């Protein structure tokens, strides 16, 4: 399963439902986009270290950006940015899930639901 950034933010804030989802998952994967978003949102060195430790402690696999992911993300932007507001970061995360044959779990149904070839599990905090 590929986790969207919002799920990990919920976990870091102590959301019990999000913690259970992480604990029950057979595989813990994130896209490189999610990795960068998490680190970018750190306000200081302590938060930065905490995020890195969190990812390491739970043994999250970080899925790297590939040419196929980039190509698919660009297609998603062409198809869905004007009609549904899909942004580049969400397109990269969705493309990562599709290219890896994974289900994406996210609380952000609005931006991901229009992507027809994406297996999406909606999280309700």
Image (cartoon, helix red, strand yellow):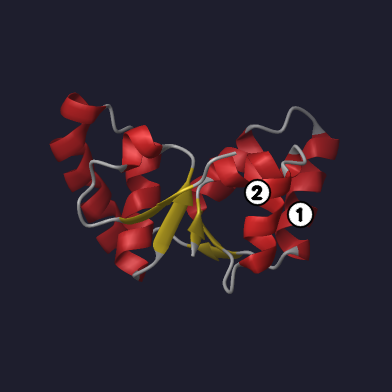
User: In which quadrant is the C terminus drawn?
Assistant: top right
For label 2, the SS is helix
Asked if residue 78 shows in the view, the reply is yes
Contact check, label 1 and label 2, Cβ < 8 Å = no
**Nearer-the-camera pick, 49 or 90:** 90
Please identify the quarter of the rendering in which residue 26 is found: bottom right
Q: Which residue is tagged 2?
A: 18
Residue 88 visible within the image:
no
Residue furthest out toward the right: 46
In the rendering, at what x and y percent does residue 39 appear?
65, 41
Residue sitting at x 74%, y 62%? 56
In this rendering, the answer to whether 82 lies above or below 1 is above
Residue shown at the point (73%, 64%) measured from the top left:
58
Q: Residue furthest bottom?
A: 26
Task: Please state which of residues 11 and 37 is positioned toward the viewer in this rendering.
Answer: 11
Viewer-proximal residue, 88 or 15? 15
- Residue wearing tag 1: 54
Residue at (66, 40) in percent of width and height: 10
For residue 45, above or below residue 28: above
Q: Position of residue 65 (x, y in %)?
A: 40, 58
Residue 29 point in image, percent of width and height: 54, 63
Distance in Å between CA atoms under marks 1 and 2: 14 Å
User: Closer to us: mark 1 or mark 2?
Assistant: 2
């Amino acid at each position: 399963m590929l986790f969207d950034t919002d799920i990990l933010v919920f976990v870091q804030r102590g959301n019990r439902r999000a913690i259970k989802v992480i604990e029950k998952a057979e595989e813990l994967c994130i896209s490189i986009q999610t990795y960068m978003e998490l680190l970018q949102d750190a306000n200081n060195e302590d938060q930065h270290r905490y995020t890195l430790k969190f990812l390491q402690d739970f043994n999250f696999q970080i899925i790297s950006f590939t040419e196929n992911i980039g190509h698919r993300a660009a297609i998603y932007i062409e198809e869905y940015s004007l009609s549904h507001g899909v942004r580049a970061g969400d397109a990269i995360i969705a493309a990562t899930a599709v290219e890896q044959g994974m289900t994406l779990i996210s609380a952000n149904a609005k931006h991901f639901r229009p992507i027809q070839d994406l297996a999406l599990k909606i999280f309700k905090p």
